[in-house]
Image (cartoon, grey):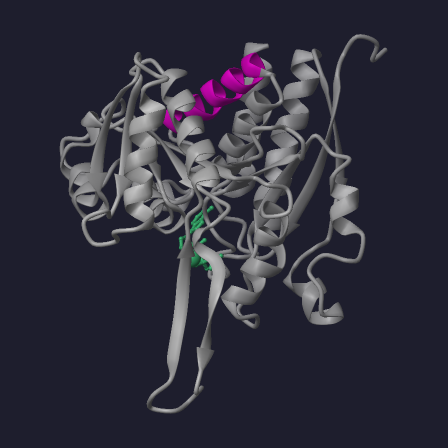
């Protein structure tokens, strides 16, 4: 019965906090979509890699784990972080332990205001804010280089060295130009702090200028990161695709998520654009232990994450259908508490499934 229909193997890693709740919701909606469309299959395998596993075994990823992951077409990730594990241990133990060896060097974070949601910005409507932030995901300020000496002494010194290689900066900026080119406005803003950081950030500016020559159809401009926060807040409609370093884009994308109305909406894709390794898709939010187990986590970020994953797998139509259904449900007012509604995770999930079934 499956002849002619491609099957994609998806590794699911729900991990910590609300991760399992939203990943379950995401898989429910994906299954509903594939059943209704009947054009492709998704096969899920679950991995219990989490802070609980780490506390029991001392490892987030069991021996041979990464090798197993390589067999999959994509990874659907929940969230990592637990109150009883230091954040830098959980982050490096699981998320970065996958991103780095799999060379997922482009972190892509779309943000927009959904119909039916409210931006905290006055006079900002859906359509005024529709961005993609492309974040460098392999080096930079989070390269993990540095150290501490004379620990605990008054004269203790700690260094945190940012690494920028021409190779990594170029491939990322090229990817950002391609992203900008694929969008209607063909507009790219390159963010740096090249007035104060005069080595790595100047390299960024120079590489951007070189790569821009290959994209004459893309309009590009440069912004310093501090001025960029002002522009995002006061003139969101002047922006489209944004590229920045690991640290800068980390901060800007949290701002972007907040300006769009909730951290519970936005997805993030960790892409290996060479497609040698599986890419990893996750909601932008963290494990949110304050609402874990209450059944009120917003699953929309994971639905959008699932849509991004489908698009990366080449299932553009399915991806668009899913997003239209999610927005429709939002506009109808079936929303979780963070968006000003009173629906539960399950109610939003069921509403999206009903919308899919109604359409297809
Ligand atoms: P991490 O340390 O992994 O980033 P966190 O505990 O800091 O996790 P975040 O996920 O970053 O939490 O979210 C910050 C706040 O936003 C949380 O306290 C939570 O209440 C809210 N929040 C996050 N995600 C969601 C969601 N999907 N639905 C509803 N509220 C959310
Ligand atoms: Mg956080």
Left or right: where does residue 51 sit relative to residue 188? right
Give 16 or 104, whichever is nearer the viewer: 104
Q: Is residue 255 visible?
A: no
Give 226 or 311, whichever is nearer the viewer: 226
At 67% from the left edge and 35% from the top edge, which residue is drawn? Answer: 277
Q: Is residue 113 above or below residue 254?
A: above
Ligand 2 placement by image quarter: bottom left
Q: Main secondary structure of the magenta part?
A: helix
Q: Is residue 197 magenta?
A: no
Q: Is residue 321 magenta?
A: yes
Q: Is residue 32 visible?
A: yes
Residue 145: % across, % down: 48, 63
Q: Looking at the rendering, which quadrant does residue 62 occupy?
A: bottom right
Left or right: where does residue 314 sit relative to residue 251? right
Q: Is residue 330 above or below residue 230?
A: above
Residue 297: % across, % down: 49, 47
At 53% from the left edge and 69% from the top edge, which residue is drawn? Answer: 83
Q: Looking at the rendering, which quadrant does residue 61 occupy?
A: bottom right
At 18% from the left edge and 40% from the top edge, which residue is drawn? Answer: 233
At 40% from the left edge and 56% from the top edge, which residue is drawn? Answer: 162
Q: Is residue 60 above or below residue 256?
A: below
Give 183 or 237, whichever is nearer the viewer: 183
Q: Which residues are magenta?
A: 316-332
């Amino acid at each position: 019965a499956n002849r002619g229909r491609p099957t994609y193997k998806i590794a699911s890693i729900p991990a910590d906090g609300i991760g399992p709740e939203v990943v379950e919701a995401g898989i429910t909606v994906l299954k509903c979509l594939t059943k209704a469309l009947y054009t492709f299959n998704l096969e899920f395998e679950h991995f219990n890699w989490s802070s609980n596993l780490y506390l029991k075994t001392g490892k987030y990823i069991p021996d041979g784990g990464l090798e197993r992951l390589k067999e999959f077409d994509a990874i659907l990730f929940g969230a990592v972080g637990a109150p009883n594990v230091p954040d830098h241990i959980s982050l490096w133990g699981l998320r970065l332990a996958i991103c780095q060896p799999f060379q997922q060097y482009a972190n892509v974070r779309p943000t927009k205001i959904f119909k039916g949601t409210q931006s905290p910005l006055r006079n900002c409507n859906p359509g005024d804010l529709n961005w993609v932030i492309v974040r460098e995901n392999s080096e930079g300020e989070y390269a993990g280089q540095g150290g501490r000496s004379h620990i605990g002494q008054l004269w203790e010194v700690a260094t945190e060295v940012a690494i920028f290689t021409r190779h990594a900066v170029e491939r990322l900026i090229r990817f950002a130009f391609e992203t900008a080119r694929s969008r209607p406005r063909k507009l790219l803003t390159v963010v740096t702090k090249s007035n104060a950081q005069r080595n790595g950030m100047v390299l960024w500016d120079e590489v951007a200028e070189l790569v821009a020559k290959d994209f004459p159809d893309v309009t590009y401009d440069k912004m310093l990161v501090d001025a960029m926060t002002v522009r995002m807040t006061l003139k969101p409609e002047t922006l489209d695709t944004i590229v920045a370093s690991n640290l800068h884009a980390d901060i800007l994308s949290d701002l972007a998520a907040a300006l769009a109305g909730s951290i519970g909406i936005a997805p993030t894709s960790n892409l290996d654009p060479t497609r040698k390794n599986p890419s990893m898709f996750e909601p932008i939010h963290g494990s949110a232990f304050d609402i874990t187990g209450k059944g009120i986590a917003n699953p929309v970020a994971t639905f959008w994450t699932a849509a991004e994953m489908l698009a990366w797998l080449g299932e553009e139509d399915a991806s668009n259908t899913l997003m239209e259904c999610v927005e429709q449900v939002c506009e109808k007012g079936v929303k979780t508490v963070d968006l000003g509604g009173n629906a539960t995770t399950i109610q939003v999930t069921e509403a999206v499934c009903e919308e899919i079934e109604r359409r297809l």
